Image: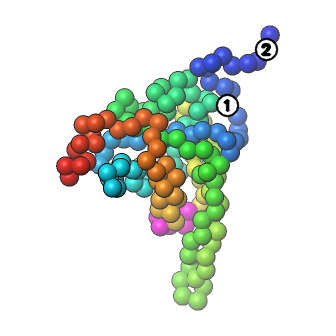
Amino acid sequence: MTNEISPGQPSEPTNVVENDEKLYRSIKLIAANFKLEQGSIRLSQAAFADRSKRTSFFRHKLTEAPPYSNPPRMSEQDAVVALLAGNIRCKISHPAGTGSAKQDIELVIDVVPETIGHHPSHAVAISSPNFPSNGAYEKLKRRLATLVGSQFEIRPDGLFLESLSDS
């Protein structure tokens, strides 16, 4: 008897998200999450927003039929994008303090599993130390939107795209 996973079956959860792991993010079809640039649809940084400043992803290897399954696609209408965990991990420099005490701090961005109360494939991008301000978190969201560019696993539907070009 082997422990191999059949095609289409998720792997067992692990407590480490590897750099080469494909991560999915479901994107609601609201205008704030998208922008048109030179005729190409791209994500805005709003597509990566999270009130707790912990952007959620779903791990490819722990979902059953990605990207169409739920998760990672949270609604049949949602678009889905993918990033490699190693591309999300980075260091972000951000000013902290005021006056003569003002200095840049280095935030280390990591991707970790977050499964308690969530699907076993759930992971989040976190900062160490924690994001000191919304401005620091905005830098990560901008970076994620830039990394995705105009590459979608599941593109927004045509009617939604037409509504963007009309506005």
Which amino acid, by three-letter code, is at mark 2? Thr
Q: What secondary structure is found at the residue carrying circle 2?
A: loop
| Left or right, residue 54 beside residue 77 | right
* Residue drawn at point x = 58 percent, y = 89 percent: 100
Which residue appears at 25% of the width and 48% of the height?
164
Q: Is residue 132 magenta?
A: yes
Q: Residue furthest top?
A: 1
Q: Residue at x 59, y 36 (%)?
A: 59
Can the viewer see residue 65 in this picture? yes
Does residue 102 lie above or below 88 as drawn? below
In magenta segment, residue 53: no
Amino acid carrying label 1: it is Pro
| Contact, mark 2 vs mark 1 (Cβ under 8 Å) | no
**From this viewpoint, which residue is outermost toward the front?**
38
- The percent position of residue 141, horizontal first and vertical second, equals 48, 56
Kindly identify which residue carries mark 1: 13
Q: Residue 2 has which mark?
A: 2
Crowd tier of the residue under label 2, counting other residues whose Cα lies within 10 Å: few below 14, some 14–19, many 20 or above: few
Describe residue 116's horizontal placement relative to residue 37 as left or right: right
